[in-house]
Amino acid sequence: MKALAEHVESPELSAACLRFIESGGHTTQSFGLGQVIGQVFALLYLSPRPLCLDEITEELGVSKASVSTTVRQLENWSAVKHVWVKSDRRDFYEAETDFKAMLRQGVLATLRKKMDTAAVRLENVETTLADALKNSPQPEREETRVVTERLQRARQFHAKINGLLNNPLLDHLL
Amino acid sequence: MKALAEHVESPELSAACLRFIESGGHTTQSFGLGQVIGQVFALLYLSPRPLCLDEITEELGVSKASVSTTVRQLENWSAVKHVWVKSDRRDFYEAETDFKAMLRQGVLATLRKKMDTAAVRLENVETTLADALKNSPQPEREETRVVTERLQRARQFHAKINGLLNNPLLDHLL
DNA sequence: AACTACGTTCAGTCCATACTGAACGATATG
DNA sequence: CATATCGTTCAGTATGGACTGAACGTAGTT
């Protein structure tokens, strides 16, 4: 963050913007994503006009490579959108202000993916267990009963979370 | 994971358990936590009896230090609970089966903490902005209007998420 | 064609942190 | 008291992933 935001001329105002950008970086970093992604979004979010890659790198003082990949990431989450400025070759971006859509296509979407892969793993375990019970002569031991029951409860829990994520009521609560 | 689960005598059954433990590790790792914490919980979850630290380290083939800190972490999330076995000095642990409570005191609690620190950061930004506007002679520029409006929307969004996290309806959905 | 301006990509670096090994304190047991 | 067992702690290591710098491809400009 080597340069003050150029579009902000008042030094006090730009101080507030820098704090906001810094906060965005810290927040995303606390969630395991890097700090660049939060800074990029925060910068675009406060900018009154779309910014191009070089402007972003200049304002934040990070490499162009980071900004490029980060912007695409934010685009996938529909957190920023591509904007064409006429008679300008460069790609401009502006922040999406619809946080609801951001949540759906960002956080909730990745959550759903993780749930899916977890489901695949669970099915793997269960088929392994089914094979084991088919080949095992004594299916009535307490140990197998506990394992099968616990696996079933795990699956039920997984289904419940899945249902919650797909519940239209959740959308309504946002 | 150098040793098969000792409490599981059937080799096929233990194969399924190992897969489940491995899946648990991969899942927690995909969420940014390590893989040990998922493995420990998965092991305890399938175990028909409480296990002590040395048993867990033996089964998983990880260091005792990892298990010690990890078990405390799981305890804070009420994902495992301490169990006393009479005439045994060692600490035994068993998995909590109430996933609902786990979610509340694990995921949701940490989420709430992150929201709180984010709120503090936002307040910081807003006071900085308020000072800026107080000292700035021209408060009517479009730029300041955009910034103040966006900051306000950010705060509203934060409040909405906070409300959702504290909504009793969310508990009911689980 | 040559040259410039953009954006992307990829190998390499750097850094945070999960994990380890050894030392330690505490508590029992002989 | 001496010894053993158990859990925690802490400095050090290793591993994953964020980030960088340079090279590349492409599309415009002269």
Image (tube, coloured by chain):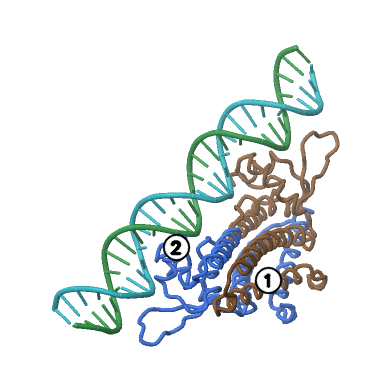
Chain colours: A blue, B brown, C cyan, D green
As shown in the figure, which amino acid type bears the numbered disc 2? Ala
Residue that mark 1 sits on: B155
In the image shown, does B57 or B82 lie closer to the viewer?
B82
In the image shown, does A118 or B14 lie closer to the viewer?
A118
Residue that mark 2 sits on: A3
Which residue is found at the position 70% from the left and 62% from the top?
B111
As shown in the figure, which amino acid type bears the numbered disc 1? Arg
Dot 2 falls on a residue whose secondary structure is loop
**Distance between the Cα atoms at labels 2 and 1?**
26 Å
Determine crowd level at label 2: few under 14, some 14-19, many 20+ residues with C-alpha closer than 10 A.
few
In the image shown, does B55 or B142 lie closer to the viewer?
B142
Q: Position of residue B8 (x, y in %)?
A: 70, 49
Position of the C terminus of chain B, as image quadrant, is: bottom right
Relative to residue B62, is residue A124 depicted above or below?
Answer: below
Which label is found at residue B142? none
Which residue is found at the position 42% from the left and 75% from the top?
A52
Relative to residue D26, is residue A156 depicted above or below?
Answer: above
Relative to residue B140, is residue B102 depicted above or below?
Answer: above
Q: Where is residue A154 in the image (x, y as percent from the top left)?
A: 72, 63
Residue lying furthest right in this view?
B86
Q: Position of residue B48 (x, y in %)?
A: 77, 51
Q: Mark 2 lies on which chain?
A: A
Q: Where is residue A82 in the image (x, y as percent from the top left)?
A: 47, 81
Question: Is A174 positioned to the left or the right of B19 in the image?
Answer: right
Question: Is A3 positioned to the left or the right of A148 in the image?
Answer: left
Which residue is found at the position 48% from the left and 68% from the top?
A5
Q: Which chain carries label 1?
A: B
Residue B44 in view of the camera: yes
Query: In the image, which is nearer the foreground, mark 2 or mark 1?
Result: 2
The reply to whether discs 2 and 1 touch (Cβ–Cβ < 8 Å) is: no
Res. B58 image quadrant: top right
Q: Do labels 2 and 1 share a chain?
A: no
